[in-house]
Amino acid sequence: MKKCRLQPLDVMATALQTRFTHHRMCSVDYYHHLY
């Protein structure tokens, strides 16, 4: 995977995936805190 140039769509997808993963991890922590 070459990293010569990042397309705006790739950057958006990466940011979205990171945000989604972080949100899911926070949700898991929240559920663990509940139970």
Image: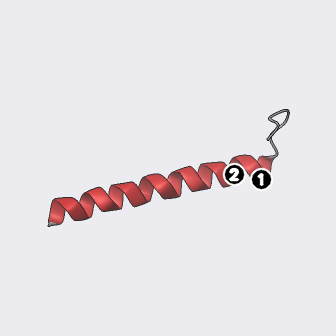
Q: Is residue 3 above or below residue 28?
A: above
Q: Which mark is residue 9?
A: 1
Query: Where is residue 34 shown, x and y percent of the image?
Result: 16, 65
Three-letter amino acid code at the position of disc 2: Met
Say if mark 1 contacts mark 2, CB within 8 Å: yes
Q: Amino acid at mark 1?
A: Leu
Mark 2, residue position: 12
Q: Is residue 9 left or right of residue 30?
A: right
Residue 12 location (% of width, % of height): 69, 51
6 relative to 27, above or below: above
Residue 2 is left or right of residue 14, and the answer is right
Taking the spot 68% from the left edge, 54% from the top edge, the residue there is 13
| Whole-percent x, y for residue 7 in the image | 82, 45
- Residue 26, by quadrant, is bottom left
- Relative to residue 16, is residue 32 drawn left or right? left
Judged from the image, the secondary structure of the residue bearing numbered disc 2 is helix
Residue at horizontal 34%, vertical 61%? Answer: 27
For marks 1 and 2, give the CA distance.
5 Å
Secondary structure type for disc 1: helix
Question: Alpha-carbon neighbours of circle 2 within 10 Å: few (<14), some, or many (≥20)?
Answer: few
Q: How is the image coloured?
A: secondary structure
Please state the total of marks drawn on the protein image: 2
Alpha-carbon neighbours of circle 1 within 10 Å: few (<14), some, or many (≥20)?
few
Q: Residue at x 14, y 67 (%)?
A: 35
Task: Give left or right: position of 4 versus 25.
Answer: right
Query: Residue 20, percent across and down?
Result: 51, 58
